[in-house]
């Protein structure tokens, strides 16, 4: 490392001392904490992003400053890799080490050793670009400045401030830049709105909804998603969007947003009896989660019928399977048209068992992974079309490059010989889905538009969609333990292999309940074991969860449960 580079790192890092007694860890959400503790960490993530870009042959890297659905006084920071996806897991230990280095000298030593090990060129000659984005939190502005300082402390690396954006927008911009595409906010809006229009234009006239059914009322969580949806809706025809909780008056994530609605199963602030029968949706604080709900007339005006990520996944799977089925009809002799697309659905053990049964009855390939978006995304990428969602509303659809190349060629071929045919229309719909959905990461705005387009295509109300299947009642509880690492799981966290004997005991309890299912897994952040249970009634689910929690406490708890 050149002396100029060493001096620059030492002088800039001396302005960002880490908080005493605080140790942070990089997880799926990046680093997240009270905003007052994050200046030093965000500065160091700036360095990390710069080194990552140089390692990846000057590919564009992103830094997003957000704490998603957390309270407004929290904040966080995470990196978007060149694909638009999350930071490679291989780099997470280095991220932890950087964030927790106590002195500028220790920080410099870590960087020097890592650069040598990874053979990262630090000559200051190779240019590199980092895109920076933040959500609407008041703390975001100063943290973004800290990130800029970190980026500019590596010679030759430039930071570009993309302003206030949703997390999925920033990931989309990184992916687009690395594909050589235009990647500003207007480009994002234009891609979404034109893809949405294409899907709407392809709806058979007999299936179109009445004007009154085209309205959706959206809870913006008083965050960046509400602001952006207000802009996007001006570019949309055939959809009437009313945005509430757009951030003008209320507090970010306080009694609003997808996380609140999904967990509490009550209406967010600003919704109530006036919305009975309407199709409603909630975004989360940084607009990477989406859930739907309706206010039923038969319950109290604060209760809702939730349509969660499992049902969004089911809707997408039905539509895509239908298009693939149409596309495969009456194939010609040309061997190029005989591509057998592999469609897969990816869930975690937390997916409601009723949703899994429903998907399997559709003869879809359903795969389970451990909890965490990274696991889901990686597995979905193994299919020609991979769909993943968590119940919390985070998910997306991935299309393989080889399938898209084939699909484009097939559409061109069909356009020349049978334009307007069912097959040509199905190919065009799938191409439109591939550009409407954000393939980098879960995106509430693109997901909302795809849901709306499919509901219009099907002619379905939210009630019809909700009735695809009936969720099994479930319950989740936490049990405090001395050491969470004592529990080791397998088979996508559905089976416990250590400590010995506990899985057999769980099986005995589960067998006592109709449609019973239960599993345990260690928390990733605290010394607790998480218990999930579902059964045919809420009373049975509660009882099973309680029985399994007692088993956990017996085997390795502190006797407090």
Image (tube, grey):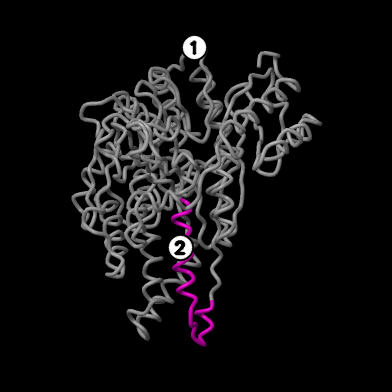
Q: Which mark is residue 119?
A: none
In the displayed structure image, the side of residue 365 where residue 62 appears, left or right = left
Residue 49 in the figure: left or right of residue 170: right
Q: CA distance from mark 1 to mark 2?
A: 52 Å
* 329 part of magenta stretch: yes
> Seen in the image, is 514 located left or right of residue 299?
right
| Any part of residue 37 in sight | yes
Earlier in the chain: of badge 1 and badge 2, it is: 1
**Does the stretch in magenta take in 64?**
no
Kind of element beneath mark 1: loop
Where is residue 422 shown, x and y percent of the image?
Answer: 39, 76
Question: Tag 2, which secondary structure?
Answer: helix
Residue marked by disc 2? 320
Look at mark 1 in the image and give the residue it sits on: 20
Image x and y of residue 545, in percent: 63, 29
The span shown in magenta is 313-338
In the image, 349: left or right of 186? Answer: right
Q: Quadrant of residue 542?
A: top right
Q: Count neighbours of disc 1 (C-alpha within 10 A) and say few if under 14, some if 14 to 19, many if 20 or more.
A: few
Q: Nearer the viewer, residue 11 or 452?
A: 452
């Amino acid at each position: 490392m050149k002396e100029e580079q060493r001096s620059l790192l030492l002088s800039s890092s001396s302005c960002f001392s880490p908080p005493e007694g605080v140790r942070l860890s990089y997880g799926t959400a990046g680093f997240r904490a009270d905003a007052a503790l994050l200046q030093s960490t965000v500065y160091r993530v700036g360095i990390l992003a710069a080194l990552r870009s140089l390692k990846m042959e000057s590919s564009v890297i992103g830094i997003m400053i957000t704490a998603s659905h957390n309270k407004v006084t929290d904040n966080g920071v995470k990196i978007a890799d060149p694909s638009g996806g999350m930071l490679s897991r291989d780099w997470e230990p280095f991220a932890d080490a950087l964030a927790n280095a106590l002195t500028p000298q220790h920080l410099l030593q870590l960087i020097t050793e890592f650069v040598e090990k990874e053979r990262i060129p630090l000559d200051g000659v190779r240019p590199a670009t980092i895109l920076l984005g933040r959500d609407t939190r008041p703390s975001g502005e100063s943290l973004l400045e800290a990130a800029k300082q970190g980026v500019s402390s590596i010679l030759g690396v430039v930071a570009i401030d993309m302003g206030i954006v949703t997390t999925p927008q920033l990931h989309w911009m990184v992916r687009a830049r690395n594909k050589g595409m235009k990647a500003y906010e207007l480009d994002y809006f234009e891609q979404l709105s034109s893809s949405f229009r294409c899907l709407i234009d392809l709806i058979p006239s007999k299936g179109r909804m009445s004007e009154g059914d085209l309205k959706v009322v959206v809870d913006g969580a008083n965050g960046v998603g509400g602001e952006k949806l207000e802009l996007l809706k001006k570019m949309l025809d055939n959809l009437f969007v009313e945005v509430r909780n757009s951030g003008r008056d209320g507090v970010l994530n306080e009694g609003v947003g997808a996380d609140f609605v999904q967990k509490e199963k009550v209406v967010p602030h600003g919704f109530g009896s006036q919305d009975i029968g309407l199709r409603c949706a909630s975004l989360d604080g940084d607009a990477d989660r989406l859930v739907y709900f309706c206010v039923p007339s038969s319950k109290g005006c604060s209760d809702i019928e939730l349509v969660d990520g499992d049902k969004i996944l089911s809707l997408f799977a039905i539509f895509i399977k239908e298009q693939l089925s149409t596309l495969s009809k009456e194939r010609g002799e040309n061997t190029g048209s005989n591509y057998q697309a592999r469609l897969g659905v990816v869930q975690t053990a937390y997916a409601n068992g009723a949703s899994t049964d429903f998907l399997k009855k559709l003869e879809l390939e359903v795969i389970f992974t451990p909890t965490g978006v990274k696991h889901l995304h990686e597995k979905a990428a193994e299919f020609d079309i991979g769909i993943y969602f968590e119940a919390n509303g985070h998910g997306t659809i991935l299309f393989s490059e080889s399938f898209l190349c084939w699909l484009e060629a097939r559409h061109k071929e069909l356009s020349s010989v049978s334009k307007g045919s069912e097959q040509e229309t199905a190919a065009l719909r799938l191409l439109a889905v591939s550009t409407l959905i954000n393939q980098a990461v879960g995106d509430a705005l693109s997901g909302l538009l795809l849901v709306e387009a499919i509901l219009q295509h099907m002619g379905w109300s939210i009630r019809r969609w909700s009735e695809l299947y009936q969720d099994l009642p479930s319950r989740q509880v936490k049990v405090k333990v001395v050491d969470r690492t004592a529990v080791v799981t397998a088979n996508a966290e559905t089976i416990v292999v250590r400590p010995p004997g506990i899985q057999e005991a769980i099986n005995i309890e589960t067998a006592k309940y109709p449609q019973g299912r239960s599993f345990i897994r260690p928390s990733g952040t605290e010394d607790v074991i998480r218990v999930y249970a579902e059964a045919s009634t809420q009373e049975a689910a509660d009882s099973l969860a309680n029985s399994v929690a007692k088993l956990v406490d017996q085997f390795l708890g502190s006797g407090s449960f």
